[in-house]
Amino acid sequence: MRQGKSWLMIVLMIAICLIVSACSSGSKSSQTTGEKTTKPQEITVRVNDDPDFLDPHKATASISFQMLLNMFEGLMAPETDGSLKPAIAESYELSKDGLTYTFKIRQGIKFHNGEALKVDDILYSFDRLMGKNGEKPLSSNFKNVDSITAPDNQTVVIKLKEPNSNFLYSLTALQSAILPKSNDGKHNENPIGTGPFKYVKYSPGANLVLAKNPDYWKKGLPYLDKVTFAFQSDDQAAVMSLLSNEVDLTSVPGHRLPEVEKNYNVSHQNNNSSLIITFNEDRKPFNDLKVRQAINIAINKQDIIDSVFSGYATRTGSNMSPAMGDYYKDGLQNVYDQDIEKAKNLLKEAGYPNGFKTTITVSSHNQMYTNIAQIAVENLKKIGIDVKINVVEWSIWLEKVYFGRDYDMTTIDLTGRPSAYEILNDYISTNDGENFFRFKNKEYDKVMTDVLKEPDTKKQIELYQRAQEILTEQSPAVYIADYQILWGSNKKVSGLKSYPFWFHDMSEVKISN
């Protein structure tokens, strides 16, 4: 009797084990065949500092748009060659008189919060930029707009007061991102756009995290599930982060290239920016042309290119890079070669035979600004100008220098744009938002007004080149170079694209497993 019970227990135990084993085997099989085992597509991109705003209508720093353009779109979008293509607008027509643009709005676009994009959101976005909501205008680009209307739910019509050859360039997310009306008052703390990636979180001083927009209107894009923009101001530390695989993409100083190029992909990008040392012309003695020219002649631009950029830069003589092709005026880069004796004589003629004391204020978010300032200080000592370097945080630089105009001298790189007009319009005397140099010149203002009315491309080029000549003659800045950006990236990363301005376009980036 006991043996029978024992035998029965053994049979039951075996049966239970077989059932458990079968269930376990079935579960493991479903994980292998029924579930994806690929890793999430995630990337970490190093940028030098925090964005100044997450609200694209208020952001001004190029460092912000490197990241924000992944979240926001405009009626038009820039191509890698600087041309434009339709984005939120599917197509457009321009009237014969050059005054009326009729945009057909792409259907099926959703904001990141799931709401369908409507023409009311487009009207709201432009009203906000133009200050028609009762607040201060957020852009000066639309003063020439007579009216914006939506005759139906698929059409937006923009009428101008005068023809404007540059107007379409004002309709990208760089200038006029389309925002949801329902998010009014919360665009900075909870940014919502229509781009390939949506906002997850912003940790000041640490990172900005974006996630894939599953409802993006470009089918199949993006490939990445997550993008983390990690803030790190020190270039040398950033290289170490790349070498230790803490970041997947970063700019690399030229002298560190040998450490990177064996095990990482390296690409060269023409920055299309203007690296300058500039002055506040509202302050003496920088309101004197001879003083500005003396400083220009005293500074050795090639020394800066060789020392700071290891030669990876193209010398310029005005506020435009050779990357702009036919619009660029060649030859201006040789106008102010270093000549110490000539610089001394100019200072003497200006009434400063013994020089003067001044301060150059630079941002700490990129070491190159301090390095450039140090070379300038040594050069200017030779003509009697005693310069103190004042290093401040990026947010302070924006507040004091760019917006407050509370400075003597500074050095910065003015971001590249796909539009020749937008590259040069910083110096228009009435452009209070961007003309932090306080440059005023009647001929320059007229040239920049005339070019907007000129429909002929060849004549536009002539006017843009004359504008560059005026900047060289009047020396509102020491024009140094357009430096190349050397990008180091993980070899598993592909799909990176280069634009004639700073934009980390993550929409087509992939990571191979």
Image (spheres, rainbow, N blue to C red):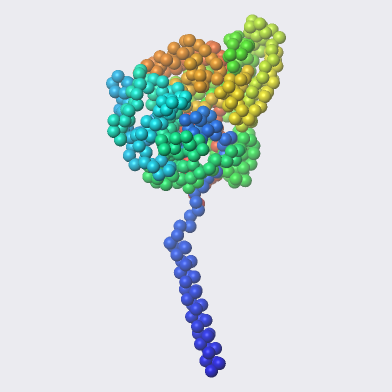
Tell me, yes or no, if residue 465 can be seen here.
Answer: yes
The answer to which image quadrant residue 262 occupies is top right
Relative height, residue 166 to residue 262 (above, below): above
Near-viewer residue (351 or 294): 351
Residue drawn at x 51%, y 77% is: 17
| Residue 216, horizontal then vertical, whole percent | 40, 43
Q: Residue 233: image x %, image y %?
A: 62, 35
In this rendering, would 59 be left or right of 194?
A: right
Count of labels in the image = 0
Depth check, front residue: 195 or 153: 153
Residue at 60% across, 40% down: 206
Q: Is residue 152 above or below residue 420?
A: below
Does residue 297 appear in the picture of this structure? no
Image coordinates for residue 403, horizontal then vertical, percent: 56, 23
Residue 275 percent coordinates (x, y): 56, 24
Q: Residue at x 58, y 14 (%)?
A: 281
As drawn, 113 above or below 179: below
Residue 338 position by quadrant = top right
In this picture, residue 163 sits left or right of residue 374? left
The answer to which quarter of the image holds residue 249 is top right
What residue is shown at x 49% (from left), y 39% (from top)?
190
Q: Residue extending furthest bottom?
A: 1
Q: Left or right: where does residue 182 sit relative to residue 374? A: left
User: Viewer-proximal residue, 313 or 283?
Assistant: 283
